[in-house]
Amino acid sequence: MVKRIVILGSTGSIGKKTLRVIDALNSSLVARPVRSKSSTSNGTRGPSLEKEKTKYEIVALTAHSSVELLAEQARRYKPKFVAITNADYFEQLSSAVGDLDVEILSGPDSLIEIAQLDQVDIVLTAIVGAAGLPAVLAAAQAGRQLAIANKEPLVIAGELLTKAVRENGGTILPVDSEHSAIFQAMQAGSREEVSKIILTASGGPFRKATVEDMRNVTLEEALSHPVWDMGPKITIDSATMVNKALEVIEAHWLFDMPVERIEVLIHPESIVHSLVEFVDGSVIAQLGEPDMCLPIQYALTYPRRVAGLSKHLRLEEIGKLTFERPNLKTFRALPLGFEVVRTGGTAPVVFNAANEAAVQEFLAGKIKFVSIVELVEDCLNKHNVKTSVSLEELLEADAWARREVRTKVHKSIRA
C-alpha cells in the first residue's frame, strides 16, 4: 500500500518534522493489520489478520523562500513537484534542482495547483498566516484528506472550509496537538454523546503572573517557553494565550461544537493534551510526551496506530498531573476568543490578523507585551462584522486588520 503525501510548507518546523516522521515510517515499512477472508475451524469464512506494508511517498513539497532547504529536500525525497511561492526565487530554485526529474512551480497560485493534484491521499498544510488558505480550500473542494497543522484555515475560514469538506467528501485530520487529542478521544463515542471538550494549555511562561507583572515583560522572557520548543510567533501566542483562544475557534468548527461546551484548563506538565467529557460522565483524555511527531504521525497513519519516533510516556516518572483554571484578567485574549466565536463572520479573521501584526511589532521592539492583546481588542471594537462571507471578503478583512494595527503603532511611535 502507498500513501501519497503533499506537504504545503515543508521547510518550516512542522514540515521538517513531518519528513522525519515519514522517514521513520518508511525505514521499517510499517506493518499494519488487514482483514481478509479465511476458513475457520467450523468451515465458514471469517476474518483473519495478515500483514500489509505501507509506504509513504512524497508527491510535492512547497516553500516560500527557503530555496536551499527545499532543494535539499527535493534531492532526498524526489517529489514530482516543488513550488516556491515567492516567484523571485524561481530562477534560483530552477538552478538548484534543474537536473532532477521534477516540475518546478512558482508564485502563490502554485499552492492551489499542487493542492488539487490527482492521485494524492493526504495534503498536509503547515503554512503560517493566510497565505495557504486558498490552497486549503481548493484541496477541500477536490475532496482531499486534509491534515491541518496551522490554525489559520479553521480560524479564518472555518465555515467555508467545513462546508467544502462536507460537500465534496473530504476529511479534516487535525495535526495540532490539542485538536489531535480531542479527535483521538472522540473515537470513544459519537459526537451526540459528547458533553463538552476540554482544551489544555501549558500556561506559558506567565502562568502565575498578575496583570501588573505583565506590564514589564521583556522579549526574552516572553520567548522562554517552559515546555515547548516553537518558533517566535507561536511562542509569543502561548505567552499571551492567544494560541488557546485560536484553538477554541478551531475546535468550534472542527468538532461542530457550541462554544458553551468548550472549556480551557491550565495543565503545566503538558502531558494531557486535551480531554473529552461524555454525557455519562466519562472523561477520555489523550496523554503523551510534548512532541509534535505523535499527532503528525497519527494524521498520516489514521485510522491505524503504528510504532514511530515518539518517546513512550512513563507516568511513574512524571509523578503528578495538575490542572487549574486560567486567570481571565491576566489572559484577556482567552475570553476575547470565546466572544469572537459567538460573533462569527469576519470577527475571527480580524482577531487572528490583528494578533499576527501586533506580534510582529512586539518582536521588532516597537510595542510592549501587553499592547499585543490591547491592539487586537481595539481592532475588534472598530471592525464592522460581516456574516456569511466569501473568501475574498475574509482576505479583505485580514488585510484591513493588519493595516489598522500597523497604522496605530506607527502613530503612537511618532507621537
Image (tube, rainbow, N blue to C red):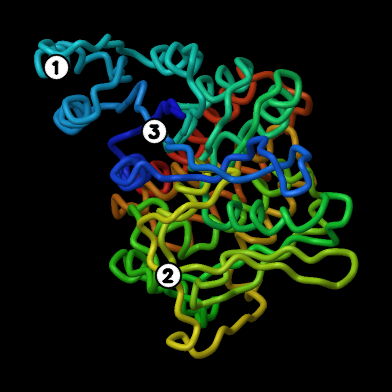
The disc labelled 3 sits on which kind of residue?
Tyr
Please report whichever mark, 3 or 1, sits nearer to the chain's N-terminal start. Answer: 3
From the viewer's perspective, tell me whether residue 294 is left or right of residue 166: left
Question: Which residue corresponds to mark 3?
Answer: 56
Q: Is residue 387 above or below residue 414?
A: above
**Residue in the picture at 39% in, 71% down:** 227
Q: Which mark is residue 97?
A: 1
From the viewer's perspective, tell me whether residue 100 is left or right of residue 151: left
* Mark 1 vs 2: CB contact within 8 A: no
From the viewer's perspective, tell me whether residue 258 is left or right of residue 295: right
Q: Is residue 144 above or below residue 43?
A: above
From the viewer's perspective, tell me whether residue 5 is left or right of residue 211: left
Depth order, front residue of 223/80: 80
Please report whichever mark, 2 or 3, sits nearer to the chain's N-terminal start. Answer: 3
Inspect this view and state whether residue 415 appears: no
Front disc: 3 or 1: 3
Please report whichever mark, 1 or 2, sits nearer to the chain's N-terminal start. Answer: 1
Depth order, front residue of 242/162: 162
The disc labelled 2 sits on which kind of residue?
His
Q: Which mark is residue 312?
A: 2
**Residue in the picture at 54% in, 80% down:** 210
